[in-house]
Image: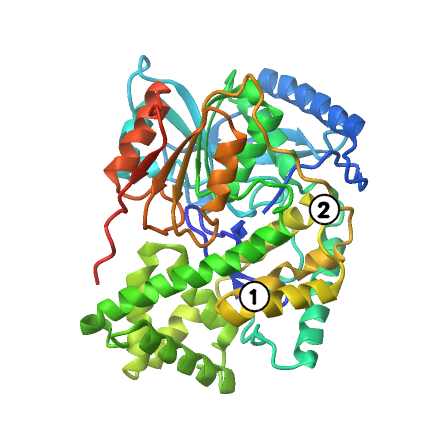
């Protein structure tokens, strides 16, 4: 599953026709590999990795000399003054640093404090893979209070990762076709349903190769990490200050492994499990379990607020209404366009983010009360929004390309079928939708790599890890795994909470510690458990 919004993970249209969020893992996704030349040995191509690291050093030295030609942002980027935009040039293939180059779009806003208060640039990635970080400087122009202290000390810098948005964007299918609805119900009733979804996944993978084949071998997490180091150099920074959320935590984990001596301060929030065994197939299976748990949390909250929503006083009652809605939409899509796939896409934002609890429950409540149009408006695609649809298709293409290239995926359909059939029995909300979204990786047309072995090196400074205990997109075990691998790191756990992306929420126990670390470098002497942020009020 994947994030497609700047600070949130939300539904993306799966290649096989399922609308699903990812963590991405996309939600979830990604690991470095030994070599962009496509080593498949499993042991890693050490010489290939060394070539790429040498290429990264050459590109960084070049970028440090060139700097960034900052200008007012293009009008259609939606970034108001005084935010400035520019480009950083990087090699497509780091093993060939003098070969084909691509341009990475970056933006910034200067620190709001004095020259004496300034500590450099804070570079941000919101997740995905496929998410754009360009809206990060808007946390200053919109005066987001959680970020006010940090903005005094740091320039806020965002970027579009390779393949995303304004950075040599890739595509796998016509965007208008991508968003058309209704899609097939992701939960298969028959073997014929499964064969149809498998065909769609295979065709999607072929479409990626046809439309973007020259980019696909190089759409990996390690290459994005090398781009990040070149951006650091272009900014004139000797060391990187980095904030990564969701998939951005995996970028941070791999950066800390490959460039430990280049890290100044790093905050990772809502952590992708960096274990090589989890990237990416197993990570997506773990998501299915976690999403079911958080879906139940939301239903409990809806039931507790029955006086407002009138959807039932127990979780079972709310679930019964969901199943009734799903069955109705399957039999006859609402407005001709909202079937089960579109419903999952809309409703999944509630397990993702607490900020979606009230809006999703409100629309659901209206439907049950007889207002079908509110749900159609919320869940149906807008074919007139060609720019937004292009962005959604691009985000999904990058998600797929990175996850599929980062690691080796099962190619045997029997394994996919067995694993997802088993999981679906007890975790039906997201399992099959997530499976179809990731299935193109089973027939991916370029070589798949071996994930980087994430671990500390002696030059890596202490890293701050922030995680909610019941996160659906990036389950809690991922934070524990990275904490174990990054020696000297500190973990802040938001106990009993489950919203994805903790650092942007109002929780003084978390906020003050993030501020203190980024402003002074100081961490608590032990890990910290914080009470949850405030529960949404209807």
- Tell me the quadrant of the picture where the N terminus can be found: bottom right
Q: Position of residue 509 (x, y in %)?
A: 26, 36
| Residue 243 against residue 232 in the figure, above or below | below
Q: Position of residue 227 (x, y in %)?
A: 61, 31
User: Left of 195 or right of it: where is 352?
Assistant: left
Residues at circles 1 and 2 in contact by the CB criterion of under 8 Å: no
- Residue found at the far bottom of this picture: 331
Which corner quadrant of the image does residue 525 belong to? top left
Q: Secondary structure at mark 2?
A: helix
What's the residue at 69%, 79% (across, down)?
191
Q: Position of residue 27 (x, y in %)?
A: 52, 52
Residue 423 disc label: 1
User: Left of 533 or right of it: where is 23?
Assistant: right
What's the residue at 52%, 21% (across, down)?
460
Q: Secondary structure at mark 1?
A: helix
At label 2, counting other C-alpha atoms closer than 10 Å, the crowd grade (few under 14, some 14-19, many 20 or more) is: many
User: Left of 78 or right of it: where is 413?
Assistant: right
The one of 521 and 181 positioned closer to us in this rendering: 521
Q: Is residue 176 in view?
A: no
- Tell me the quadrant of the picture where the C terminus can be found: bottom left
At label 1, counting other C-alpha atoms closer than 10 Å, the crowd grade (few under 14, some 14-19, many 20 or more) is: some
Q: Position of residue 536 (x, y in %)?
A: 25, 56
Question: Which of the marked residues, 1 or 2, is nearer the chain's N terminus?
Answer: 2
Say which of marks 1 and 2 sits in front. Answer: 1
| Residue 426 against residue 121 in the figure, above or below | below
Residue 216 disc label: 2
Q: Is residue 230 in view?
A: yes
| Residue 444 against residue 491 in the figure, above or below | below
- Residue found at the far left of this picture: 307
């Amino acid at each position: 599953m994947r994030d497609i919004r700047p600070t949130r993970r939300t539904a993306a249209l799966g290649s096989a026709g399922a609308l699903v969020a990812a963590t991405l893992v996309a939600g979830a996704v990604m690991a470095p590999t030994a070599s962009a030349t496509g080593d498949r040995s499993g042991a890693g191509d050490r010489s290939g990795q060394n070539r790429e690291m040498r290429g990264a050093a050459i590109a960084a030295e070049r970028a440090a000399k060139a700097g960034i030609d900052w200008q007012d942002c293009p009008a259609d980027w939606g970034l108001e003054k005084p935010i400035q935009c520019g480009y950083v040039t990087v090699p497509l293939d780091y093993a060939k640093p003098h070969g084909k180059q691509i341009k990475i779009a970056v933006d910034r806003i200067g620190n709001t404090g004095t020259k004496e208060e300034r500590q450099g640039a804070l570079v941000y990635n919101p997740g995905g893979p496929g998410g754009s970080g360009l809206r990060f400087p808007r946390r200053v122009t919109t005066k987001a209070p959680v970020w006010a202290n940090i903005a005094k000390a740091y320039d806020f810098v965002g970027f579009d990762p390779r393949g995303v948005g304004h950075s040599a964007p890739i595509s796998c299918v016509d965007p208008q076709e991508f968003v058309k609805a209704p899609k097939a119900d992701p939960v298969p009733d028959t073997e014929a349903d499964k064969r149809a979804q498998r065909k769609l996944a295979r065709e999607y993978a072929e479409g990626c190769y046809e439309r973007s084949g020259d980019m696909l071998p190089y759409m990996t997490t390690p290459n994005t990490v090398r781009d990040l180091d070149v951006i650091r150099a272009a900014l004139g920074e000797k060391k990187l200050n980095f904030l990564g959320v969701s998939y951005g935590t995996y970028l941070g984990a791999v950066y800390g492994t490959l460039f430990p001596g280049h890290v100044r301060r790093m905050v990772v929030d809502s952590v992708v499990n960096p274990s090589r065994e989890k990237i990416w197939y197993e990570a997506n299976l773990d998501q299915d379990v976690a999403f079911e748990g958080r879906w139940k949390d939301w239903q409990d909250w809806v039931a507790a607020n029955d006086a407002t929503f009138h959807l039932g006083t127990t979780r079972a009652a709310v679930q019964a209404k969901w199943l009734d809605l799903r069955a109705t939409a399957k039999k006859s899509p609402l407005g001709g366009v909202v079937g089960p796939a579109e419903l999952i896409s809309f409703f999944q934002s509630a397990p993702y983010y607490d900020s979606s609890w009230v809006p999703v429950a409100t629309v659901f409540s209206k439907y049950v009360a007889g207002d079908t149009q509110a749900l159609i408006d919320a869940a149906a695609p807008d074919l007139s929004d060609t720019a937004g649809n292009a962005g959604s298709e691009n985000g999904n293409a990058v998600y797929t390309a990175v996850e599929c290239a980062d690691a080796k995926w099962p190619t045997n359909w029997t394994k996919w079928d067995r694993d997802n059939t088993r999981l679906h029995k007890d975790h039906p909300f997201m399992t099959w939708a997530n499976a179809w979204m990731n299935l193109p990786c089973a027939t991916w047309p370029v070589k798949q790599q071996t994930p980087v072995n994430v671990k500390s090196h002696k030059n890596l400074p202490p890293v701050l890890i922030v995680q909610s205990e019941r996160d659906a997109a990036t389950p809690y075990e991922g934070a524990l795994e990275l904490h174990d691998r990054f020696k000297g790191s500190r973990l802040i756990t938001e106990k009993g909470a489950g919203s994805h992306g903790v650092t942007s929420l109002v929780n003084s126990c978390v906020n003050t510690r993030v501020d203190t670390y980024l402003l002074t470098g100081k961490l608590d002497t032990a890990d910290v458990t914080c009470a949850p942020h405030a529960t949404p009020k209807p």
